[in-house]
Image (spheres, rainbow, N blue to C red):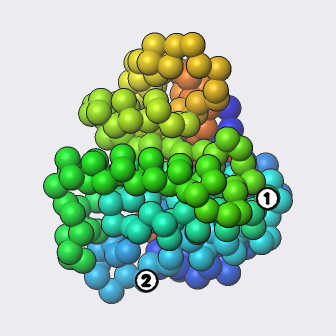
Amino acid sequence: MKRGLYLAPFDELADPRLLAELARAAESVGWDGVFLWDRIAYPPGERAVADPWVALSAIACVTDTLRLGPMITPLSRRRVQKVARETVTLDHLSNGRLTLGVGLGNADDLEPFGEAIDPRERGRLLDTGLERLDGFWSGGFRPLPVQRPRIPVWVAANWPNRRPVQRAVRWDGLFPIELPGPEGLAELAEEVRRARAGSDAPFDLVVEVAPGADVHAWEAAGATWVLTSIDPQPPEPEVRAVVDAGP
């Protein structure tokens, strides 16, 4: 099981230089990954919000081993051809350390900008976007990604909704949100195992926990990644303390 940090790049953490510094510190004390929220806005309206792709590029330049990525990018609001260029460029910049987290996103971050908010429509756009993205990665665009057969894709799912789980098993990982506990993850792990019977491709089960949480039960339930989630947004010294404490 690997341990990562799940950070919201808001307020003081909207500074990409600070995020890069924190990521470098995280790598030095044994964290395996750093993942950033992908939001355009977050209440209150005057809150500072950083672009995750620019921040992740800064992180890639000052680290060597951390896995990194957005958690999660709603493809329904993105032009897939642009995401293809961004992901492959970041995959090369990081020497193959990018994971793309995707999902439906939050309606309150979509509606003010005229984006689709109907869940079924967002789901349709996500599925179409992922297929197109895989086509670009597979040779539709050059260069190809560093990672083969593709950049790993983790799909978010709100418990207990099962449709996103069905989507996730076609890709590389599941990020279930609002799980009731490790028993819920064990249930999903069994569903994934049955759905992927006969496949020997790696598949990640990703959960988020609060700082200081005991992760052993999550590991026993099948988690391959446990992300320490620092909700928006304590002061920077509190975030740094979590980072420096190590996994």
> In terms of secondary structure, where does tag 2 sit?
loop
Residue 236 in view (yes/no): no
Residue shown at the point (28%, 68%) measured from the top left: 109
The quadrant of the picture occupied by the N terminus is top right
Give the crowd class for mark 2: few <14, some 14-19, many >=20 residues within 10 Å. some
Between 143 and 200, the one nearer to me in the picture: 143
Give yes or no for contact between labels 1 and 2 (Cβ–Cβ under 8 Å). Answer: no
Q: Which mark is residue 48?
A: 2
Residue shown at the point (41%, 44%) measured from the top left: 156
Eyeballing the image, is 38 above or below 72? below
Residue at far bottom of view: 46
Residue 123: image location, x then y, percent: 28, 48
Residue 179: image location, x then y, percent: 37, 34
Residue 122: image location, x then y, percent: 26, 54
> In terms of secondary structure, where does tag 1 sit?
loop
Q: Which mark is residue 135?
A: none
Which three-letter amino acid code belongs to the residue tagged 1? Answer: Asn
Which three-letter amino acid code belongs to the residue tagged 2? Answer: Ala
Eyeballing the image, is 60 above or below 5? below
Between 52 and 46, the one nearer to me in the picture: 52
Residue shown at the point (67%, 72%) measured from the top left: 57
Q: Which residue is disc 1 drawn over?
A: 95
Residue at far front of view: 140
